[in-house]
Amino acid sequence: MLRTLLLLLGFLLTASLAVAEESQEAKGTHGVVATVHPIASRIALDILKDGGNAIDAAVGAGLALGVVDGFNSGIGGGCFLLIHKADGETVALDGRETAPAAAHRDMFLRDGVADPDLSRKGPLAVGVPGALAAYEWVLGHHGSKSIAEVIRPSAKVAREGFTLGADYVRRLKSAEAKLREFPGAAAIFLNDGHALEVGDQLVQKDLAATYDGIAQHGIDHFYKGPIAQAVARWMKERGGLLTESDFASYAPIPRVPIRTTYRGYEILGFPPPSSGGVHVAQILNILETFDITRLSAADRTHVIAEAMKLAFADRTHWLGDPGFAKVPRGLIDKAYAVKLAGKISLEKASPVPSHGLPPKADEEWFGKHTTHFCVADGQGNWVACTQTVNTTYGSGIVVPGTGVVLNNEMDDFAAQPGKPNAFGLLGADANAVAPGKRPLSSMSPTIVLQDGRPVFSVGAAGGPTIITQALQAVVRRLDFKRPLAECLGQARIHHQWQPDRLLVEESLDADIQRALRAKGHQLRPSKGIGVSQAMARHPDGSLGAQSDPRIEGSALGY
Ligand code: GLY
């Protein structure tokens, strides 16, 4: 016991704490919310106070983020919603974009070689958006309010404008050149060809009109009405593939959540086409074979990095849309984890030449793209939602008159085996482009249950680091019982097998970094890895929510 306490104390002293002192966990008994933006959190909290449940509030937050954080997500993109309801029902709703009907395997090849410009910006980069259809589905099945009720507050913000903060402007500046290429986007986000500045007001009248249209006519306004028509017309004139029929036939897909156990807790994750649930579960299964609270901080960090590497090697080979590729369920088999754990040496970083064979059973900031938010209400409904337009401002396209930033999610397919996407991720046949297929994602909304009730939830933004951020937060919470601010604030690492390098936040303790180098890891220091949001239920029954201390996010409760 004393030894455990001393080890824990050692961990606390050696692990670098990047937690901002002022970072406060929001508390409440009636409801909590955490998002990356105060306006989105406020809108969600107001919906809860107005009698809405966590599903209503989550949709309100998602729609608000499309206005105030539109470079990360919006109705021109997609989302995964993971819900645990007070009655014990679990919902995993896939609102991922789909490839248009005219998409084909080699559509991003030019002279036989993948051209990343084609999959990352402009007309071919865009998948059929899914977020709005998913919002309506969850409201209809599990909410208590209509889309009109939850969209109106965000329409107002779009119409009246909001003041730009430093996070927004930093991201806007990083996408300035791309936005300049698309007059519809430039007219909204640039001023004389240059990014708006901190303190400027961003007014989005076209987006407000689109939200108003949805409030008035329902989501058909988007999928079967003027928005689909305008986008299809624009695409046709510019060689894009999206048609009105692609929009009209979009449907979100209810899926079965990934479930695993970790040290007595039950972990719910998002299934394919997300790789998140599978690999968070797989890495936890590997870590469970180690007594990680007894390892030194350096050994523990090393083991976690090695487990990440093994999981990402599997991701590259096996993962894709389950409607098109057979994703082996054995990837989350405990026996397979034991086998993989056997490949980890405590002494040195081991090469992982290729993927494993699971048993058959049935930028400098390394991308903060995407956004995660979470809401819980006093009745016991929990929602964890990650949504995205992929990289900053997606494809860069805003079709004039719509105000909607269109995603570049087609880049999440493997354009060509062996060619990395925007996140350096490789893919295989399982994630090749095909009509109607959903590109593989890393989005990892996660809910942890104890005795059948949620006690912790986390999710993140930042490409493949989403998986490893969620994983590290779960370990900090479940193994080390850390407060939410530390679960998110402590220095992070990330390994994705290829490229073979270990990303570490610069704030990671220097001794740990030295020890990792000595074991053979190629370290790549990073100012920051991603952005996470989390929630918890405390032993006294109260709720807590936390936004990532790395950003000017917002957690609220009442
Ligand atoms: N577009 C990032 C992801 O879905 O993983």
Image (spheres, grey):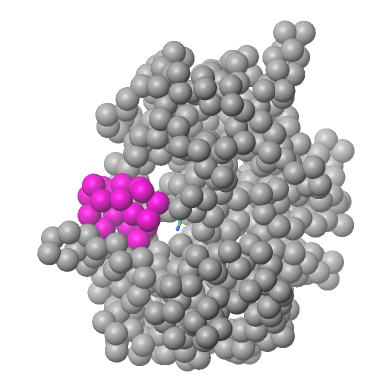
Q: How many numbered discs sit on the rendered protein?
A: 0
Residue at left 29%, top 54%? 414
Specify whether residue 258 is in view: no
Question: Looking at the image, which residue is at 76% across and 14% down?
Answer: 5
Q: Residue furthest left?
A: 111
Q: Is residue 134 magenta?
A: no
**Is 411 colored magenta in this rendering?**
yes
> Ligand 1 is found in which quarter of the picture?
bottom left
Q: Position of residue 269 (x, y in %)?
A: 54, 45
Front residue of 204/333: it is 204
Q: x%, y% of residue 391?
A: 46, 62
- Above/below status of 292 relative to 28: above
Is most of the magenta stretch helix, strand or loop?
A: loop
Relative to 101, residue 270 above or below? above
Residue occupying the point 74% across, 69% down? 39
Q: Quadrant of the C terminus?
A: bottom right
Q: Name the image quarter holding the N terminus.
A: top right
- Is residue 48 shown left or right of residue 251? right
Residue depicted at x 52% and y 78%: 194
Q: Nearer the viewer, residue 298 or 418?
A: 298
Residue 232 on image: x %, y %: 36, 86
Left or right position of 449 against 555:
left
Q: Nearer the viewer, residue 170 or 143?
A: 170
Q: Hey, which quadrant is residue 201 in on the image?
A: bottom right
Start and end of the magenta stretch? 410-429
